[in-house]
Image (spheres, helix red, strand yellow):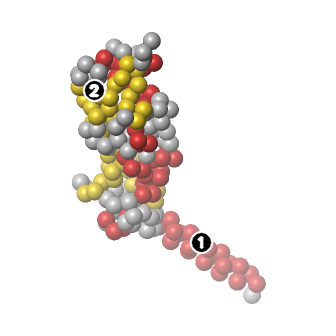
Amino acid sequence: MAGTKSSSKLFYENFLLESLLEHRLEITVHIHCLQFDGLEPLDICLSPTQQVRAIKDVILKEEPANFHHDTMVVTYKGKHLEDYFQLRDYGIQDGARVDVLVEQRQVWVVTESDEHYLVDVEPSISIWHLKQIVEAMTGVSPQDFELFLLNEKLRDSLELSDYAVKQKSKLQMVTKCT
């Protein structure tokens, strides 16, 4: 009798394991991002009951320094997916292709001589990296100028998202006195 219980217990555990595996979805995630062109698609395995946000979580584990939840838009068959809905709510099937678009913003950089430069950036870009992009446009070294948003100096070590920079915000470029 004891052998029967352990074998039935083993059968039950195998049944549970198989049913759990059976209800997993293998999906391919294609990431579209101008800053990181040519990213390889990710093959991930999720439960249909997991939230769409789980896709972003997987990407953040793979690329923690390059992406943020608020810059990623998940789409399936061209439809925007809301973070807190479950994968099954959108009819995502095993083998599905899901696209993740990393949003970019455009900001204006305005020089002291009133020249305007439109720069494509991601919210996660550091101020220092943005200053390097501005250097390529203006020829002014990042050490020689500061960027301001609404009279607030932007610190090199922080990101645009730390300042809630919005689409088409104007950043003032002010040359340091030497």
Which residue is outermost to the right? 2
Is residue 43 placed above or below 24 in the rendered structure?
A: above
Q: Which residue is drawn at 74% across and 81% down?
A: 3
| Mark closer to the chain start, 2 or 1 | 1
Image coords of residue 85 (percent x, y):
37, 66
Question: Exactly how many numbered labels are in the figure?
Answer: 2
- Tell me the tag on residue 110: 2
Image coords of residue 35 (percent x, y):
36, 33
Residue identified by numbered label 1: 14
- Amino acid type for the residue under numbered disc 2: Val
Category of crowding for the residue at label 2, using alpha-carbon neighbours closer than 10 angstroms: few (below 14), some (14–19), many (at least 20): some
Whether residue 5 appears in this view of the structure is yes
Q: Which residue is drawn at 40% across and 21% down?
A: 145
Image coords of residue 67 (percent x, y):
43, 42
Relative placement, left or right, of 62 versus 167 is right
Q: Which residue is drawn at 34% across and 18% down?
A: 136
Q: How far apart are marks 2 and 1 (CA)?
A: 65 Å
Foreground residue, 99 or 22?
99
- Amino acid type for the residue under numbered disc 1: Asn
Relative placement, left or right, of 128 versus 149 is right
Q: Quadrant of the N terminus?
A: bottom right
Under circle 1, the secondary element is helix
Foreground residue, 45 or 114?
114
